[in-house]
Image (cartoon, rainbow, N blue to C red):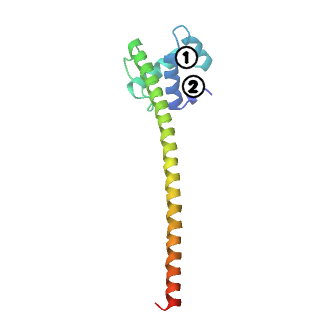
Amino acid sequence: MTVHGLTVEQRREHVLAYLEVPYGSKAGYLSAHGIGAYQIRQWRAQLYAGTLETGLVPRGVWMNDFNVNREVVRLRKQVQALQSAMTAKQAVHEQALAAKQAELDAAGAVTQALGKAIALLHAGTESADSTTGH
């Protein structure tokens, strides 16, 4: 697959992954993925400007701002940590929900059994009344 055949999401992931690559290893990352330095800078500028989806290249944004890059990497790690925490909490919530559903099912079964028992008692009382003449 050429870099021109990548989806917007794949380009975004390449830019974010490239930002996380340690200094001195960036050229290796680019060559391993068949991406040129110019191309990754262009995608990064588009990502920062919010035009990666449209393909428009902003003017004058070619400077490599290390503080912005570090902030993007920090925020991405924070988002990943929050997503992991949310996934863990969601699993706990789903387990609690399943336990409550099991309690509701058990309570429903008890309610049905009591309803049947009451119906049998009423039926038994009516047939006893009819045989004793009350």
Expressed as whole percent of the image width and height from the top left, the position of residue 93 reads 47, 41
Q: At x 48% / y 27%, what residue is drawn?
A: 80
Which one is in front, 120 or 55? 120
Q: Which residue is mark 2?
A: 3
Query: Residue 36 got which mark?
Result: 1
Label 1, residues with CA under 10 Å away: few <14, some 14-19, many ≥20: few
CA distance for labels 1 and 2: 9 Å
Q: Are marks 1 and 2 in contact (CB under 8 Å)?
A: yes
Q: Quadrant of the N terminus?
A: top right
Sequence-wise, which precedes: disc 1 or disc 2?
A: 2
On the question of residue 71 being in view, the answer is yes
Whether residue 57 is visible here, answered yes or no, is no
List x then y, in percent, for residue 57: 42, 24
Q: Residue furthest left?
A: 60
Quadrant in which residue 49 is drawn: top left
Determine the residue positioned at 52% across, 21% down.
Answer: 17
Of 51 and 129, nearer the camera is 129
Q: Quadrant of residue 51?
A: top left
In the image, taking residue 116 as reference, residue 54 lies left or right, namely left
